[in-house]
Structure formats: structure tokens, C-alpha cells
Amino acid sequence: MTVESRLLSLLGMLAAGRTYTAGELGAHFGVTPRSVRRDIASLRELGYVIESLP
């Protein structure tokens, strides 16, 4: 899966309104939680509003 397709899939999952942990998303996409956090940062840079909980 390319980074671009992962970003689009991640955006779709987050748009569904369910809350996920970075670990859950990482397991789903086969990447580390750190990669998920970087993907979310990339989406935020593109102007998408993504809220998070501690």
C-alpha cells in the first residue's frame, strides 16, 4: 500500500466518526503507531481537521 492510498484510507476511517488508537490504526495498516501519527500530521498540513484525545 502506498503512503497516498494509506492517507486516503485513514481519512475515510476517521471520517466515519469512530475513535481509534494509533496502535489500532497501525495494526490495521501494517505500520507503526509513529507512522500513523506522521500520517495524521500530513493530513493536518493539508487542512483536514483531525481531533485527538490524550
Image (cartoon, rainbow, N blue to C red):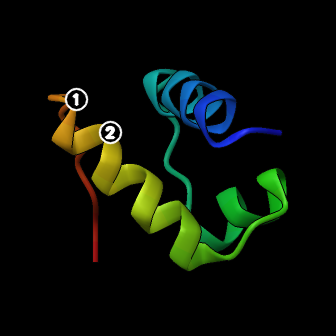
Q: Image point 22% across, 42% down: which residue? A: 44
Q: Image point 57% across, 36% down: which residue? A: 10
Mark 2 neighbour class, 10 Å CA radius: few under 14, some 14 to 19, many 20 or more: some
Q: Image point 18% across, 42% down: which residue? A: 45
**Amino acid under disc 1:** Tyr
Q: Which of the two residues, 18 or 6, is positioned nearer the viewer here?
A: 6
Q: Image point 55% across, 35% down: which residue? A: 7
Quickly name the residue at label 2: 43
Q: Give the number of the disc on residue 48.
A: 1
Disc 2 to disc 1, how far (Cα)? 6 Å
Query: Which mark is first along the chain, 1 or 2?
Result: 2
- Horizontal side, residue 26 vs residue 39: left or right: right
**What x and y, as percent, mark residue 33?**
60, 75
**What x and y, as percent, mark residue 11?**
49, 28
Judged from the image, the secondary structure of the residue bearing numbered disc 2 is: helix
Q: Which of the two residues, 11 or 45, is positioned nearer the viewer here?
A: 45
Judged from the image, the secondary structure of the residue bearing numbered disc 1 is: loop
**What x and y, as percent, mark residue 28?**
81, 53
Q: Which of the two residues, 45 or 28, is positioned nearer the viewer here?
A: 45
Q: Is residue 28 above or below residue 2?
A: below
- Horizontal side, residue 38 vs residue 16: left or right: left
Quarter holding the N terminus is top right
**Amino acid under disc 2:** Leu
Query: Exactly how many numbered labels are in the figure?
Result: 2
Mark 1 neighbour class, 10 Å CA radius: few under 14, some 14 to 19, many 20 or more: few
Q: Mark 2 touching mark 1, by CB under 8 A? A: yes
